[in-house]
Amino acid sequence: MERNKYLANRLNEVLLNGYWIANTNYKSQIESVTWQQATLKIGSLNTIASLIFHVNYYLAGLLNVFKGGELEIRDKYSFDIQPIESEADWQRLMNEFLLNSEEFVKEVANIADSKLDKPFVDEKYGTYLRNIEGIIEHSYYHLGQLSLIKKMILENDK
């Protein structure tokens, strides 16, 4: 399998449609979450909404570069979520995340194999391959958090 297709498949698994490694994915985890659940703060943990914003922040930032734009994202802003105060706000965030996820998977599936080994914006940021792998690893890390937070919320709702 070509590297780009392999990477796109891994991204699809964690973000949209997979069950192989984590036995779940973001889409299946957030589809049934209400805006109240998404914004419920449990101790010092992030909210589900803030995790979706955070992962989406990086997806959008890398998509911008894939499309010829600048690398404009900064880690210090990656949790700067606007308040979610209604179901419409939550739906907007979820839809943006899911659209960016789909677009990111497509971009990676179509990236030229030779580009994967090229520097990503600047050599200090590694290669395209390293950044795509970073998104996969980062996504699984936060998917684990999201899954546990959701489980805690559902247990609390009983």
Image (cartoon, rainbow, N blue to C red):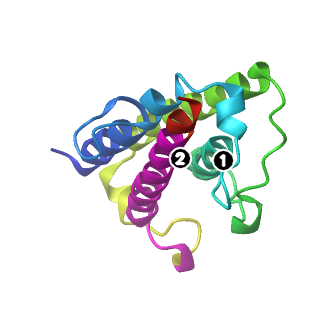
Residue 25 is labelled as none
x and y, in percent, of residue 56 in the image: 61, 44
What is the secondary structure assignment of the residue under circle 1? loop
Q: How many marks?
A: 2
Find the magenta span and give its range.
Answer: 124-152
Please give the name of the residue rendered at 84% of the width and 40% of the height, measured from the top-left corner: 83
Observer-nearest residue: 92 or 113? 92
Please identify the quarter of the rendering in which residue 75 is found. Answer: bottom right
Looking at the picture, does residue 19 appear above or below residue 80?
A: above
* 21 relative to 127, above or below: above
* Residue 50 position in % (x across, y down): 68, 47
Q: Amino acid at mark 1?
A: Thr
Binning the other alpha carbons within 10 Å of mark 1 as few (below 14), some (14 to 19) or many (20 upward) gives: many
Q: Secondary structure at mark 2?
A: helix
Q: Amino acid at mark 2?
A: Ile
Residue lying furthest bottom = 124
- At x 71%, y 30%, the residue is 36
Tag 2 residue: 149
The residue at the point 60 percent across, 34 percent down is 97
Residue 43 x, y percent position in the rendering: 67, 58
Nearer the N terminus, badge 1 or badge 2?
Answer: 1
Which of the two residues, 157 or 125, is positioned nearer the viewer here? 157
**Whole-number angstrom distance, CA of label 1 to CA of label 2:** 8 Å
Q: State the residue position of label 1.
A: 47
* For residue 99, side relative to residue 144 (left or right): right
Q: Position of residue 77 (x, y in %)?
A: 77, 60
Q: Is residue 141 magenta?
A: yes
- Magenta residues, dominant SS class: helix
- Point 68% across, 62% down: residue: 44
Labelled pair 1, 2 in contact (Cβ < 8 Å) = yes
